[in-house]
Image (spheres, rainbow, N blue to C red):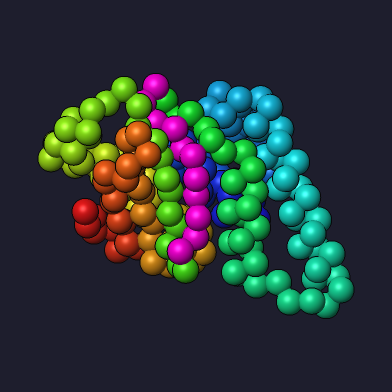
């Protein structure tokens, strides 16, 4: 459970996650990015989900990859929205089959500025650099969303930009 949640947050906040318990420096980075209250709630929700998974398995009930994805998305929805920086607010997340979909509100930037070719390339490059890291950790967690990620950018409630990054890491607009 921790692995998939860390992956999802990693794409937005660029901090390292692995199978080990969250070390103090990783928790400090979470607190810095999402605040102490949301970090505490996130860690509590992860522990509860792990307990629920353990109890499900203990009772010989099936618990598969889809259950894990649903639980992770549910946990993250409970701590959203998260202000990423002065211009971006991560307000929703969902799983569309095997695609992870981020929904982000853009503030302080005009529609025209967001949609310039240069900005689209910069945004795509930033996301791709994180998602397409060639390491065992990223390869392992991509199994949860084997068809990639999508980032939807909204200004004043209107979806203006959709970036799709499939697991082969070729960007499509």
Nearest the viewer among 139 and 7 is 7
Q: Quadrant of residue 156?
A: top left
Task: Look at the picture and state if 170 lies above or below 152.
Answer: below
Q: How many marks?
A: 0
Would you say 147 lies left or right of 141 here?
A: left
The reply to whether residue 61 is visible in this rendering is yes
Nearest the viewer among 126 and 38 is 38
Residue 163 location, x and y as percent? 28, 51
Residue found at the very far front of the displayed protein: 157
Residue found at the very far left of the displayed protein: 117
In which quadrant of the rendered image does the N terminus lie?
Answer: bottom right
Q: Quadrant of residue 49?
A: bottom right
Magenta residues, start to end: 86-96
Residue 24 location, x and y as percent? 66, 30
Nearest the viewer among 94 and 18 is 94
The reply to whether residue 129 is visible in this rendering is no
**Image point 50% across, 49% down: which residue?**
93
Residue found at the very far right of the displayed protein: 59
Q: Is residue 92 magenta?
A: yes
- Give the main secondary structure, helix, strand or loop, of the magenta stretch: strand
Task: Look at the picture and state if 146 lies above or below 134.
Answer: below
**Image point 66% across, 25% down: which residue?**
36
**Image point 46% across, 38% down: which residue?**
90
Residue 80 location, x and y as percent? 57, 38
**Image point 31% across, 22% down: which residue?**
108
Q: Is residue 119 magenta?
A: no
Would you say 44 lies left or right of 118 here?
A: right
Would you say 48 lies left or right of 106 here?
A: right
């Amino acid at each position: 459970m921790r692995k998939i949640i860390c992956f999802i947050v990693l794409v937005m906040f660029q901090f390292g996650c692995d199978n080990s318990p969250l070390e103090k420096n990783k928790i400090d980075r979470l607190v810095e990015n999402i605040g102490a209250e949301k970090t505490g709630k996130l860690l509590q929700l992860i522990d509860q989900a792990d307990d629920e998974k353990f109890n499900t398995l203990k009772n010989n009930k099936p618990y598969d990859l889809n259950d894990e994805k649903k639980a992770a998305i549910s946990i993250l929805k409970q701590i959203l929205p998260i202000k990423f920086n002065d211009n971006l607010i991560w307000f929703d997340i969902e799983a569309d089959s095997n695609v992870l979909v981020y929904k982000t509100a853009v503030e302080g930037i005009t529609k025209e500025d967001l949609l310039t070719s240069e900005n689209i390339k910069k945004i795509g490059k930033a996301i791709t650099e994180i998602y397409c890291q060639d390491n065992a950790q990223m390869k392992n967690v991509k199994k949860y969303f084997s068809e990639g990620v999508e980032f939807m950018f909204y200004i004043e409630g209107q979806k203006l930009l959709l970036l799709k990054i499939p697991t082969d890491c070729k960007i499509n607009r």
